[in-house]
Image (spheres, rainbow, N blue to C red):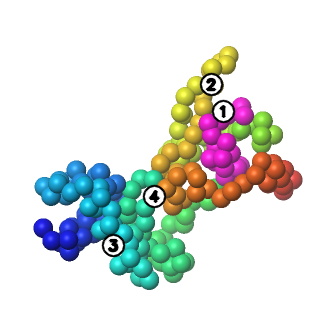
Amino acid sequence: MANKEVKQLIEAALFAFNKPMTVKMLRDSVLSPLKLSKNDINPILIELKEDYEGRGIELIETAKGFSFVTRAALSDQLSVLWQEKSPRYSRALLETLALIAYKQPITRGEIEHLRGVAVSSNIMKTLMERDWVKIVGQKDVPGKPSIYGTTKDFLHYFGLTSLAQLPELTESQLETALSELEQQ
């Protein structure tokens, strides 16, 4: 199969699947008869990414794989297509999520200590239902509290391939931000 046809097949698969696909998923599904290596597929994905530059949609890579998405700059204009509003998250939920993302692995008690207030069960339930946070283990202390960390869905939702892409935040910046939020 010619490179152009392989590129079309990858493009069609990414559109049709409607979820992010990793190179392995592509190789094991639509490309399996072609016996292509990762080194064969990666340049084609780069080409596809370049093909969509400057258009209304773009090919992005997150921790969950490659997918086509609408350009962020068009989100306000496109929002009229959906009647329901995006969920609004409380400041407490976002604080908790930020602490988990930056301090993971972390226990609920450690989150409460840093925030200075109790963490609502509803917050943890929401974060886990969204699959942004998961239990990654138990701390080896009396009571064996759960240890929390972020998931690939968290990375995907925020357009990240890894936690290293989180904005730099020093310990003092985190503490200052938390104390400012407490005063509001």
The residue sitting at the top extreme is 142
Q: Is mark 1 on a helix, strand or loop?
A: strand
User: Does residue 93 appear in this view?
Assistant: no
Residue at image coords 70%, 50% = 95
Q: How far apart are marks 3 and 1 (CA)?
A: 42 Å
Residue 107: mark in rendering: 1
Q: Is mark 3 on a helix, strand or loop?
A: helix
Above or below 103: residue 77:
below
Dominant secondary structure (helix, strand or loop) of the stretch shown in magenta? helix
Q: Name the residue under label 2.
A: 139
Q: What stretch is highlighted in magenta?
A: 91-110
What amino acid is found at the position of numbered circle 3 in the picture? Leu
Whether tag 2 and tag 1 are in contact, CB under 8 A, the answer is yes
Q: Mark 4 points at which residue?
A: 62
Of the numbered discs 4 and 1, the one sitting upstream in the chain is 4
Residue 14 location, x and y as percent?
30, 64
Q: Distance between the residues labelled 3 and 2?
A: 45 Å
Between residue 94 and residue 25, name the one nearer to us: 25
Q: Would residue 153 be found to the left or right of residue 109 on screen?
A: left
Of the numbered discs 4 and 2, the one sitting upstream in the chain is 4
Whether tag 4 and tag 2 are in contact, CB under 8 A, the answer is no
What amino acid is found at the position of numbered circle 1 in the picture? Thr
Q: Mark 3 points at which residue?
A: 48
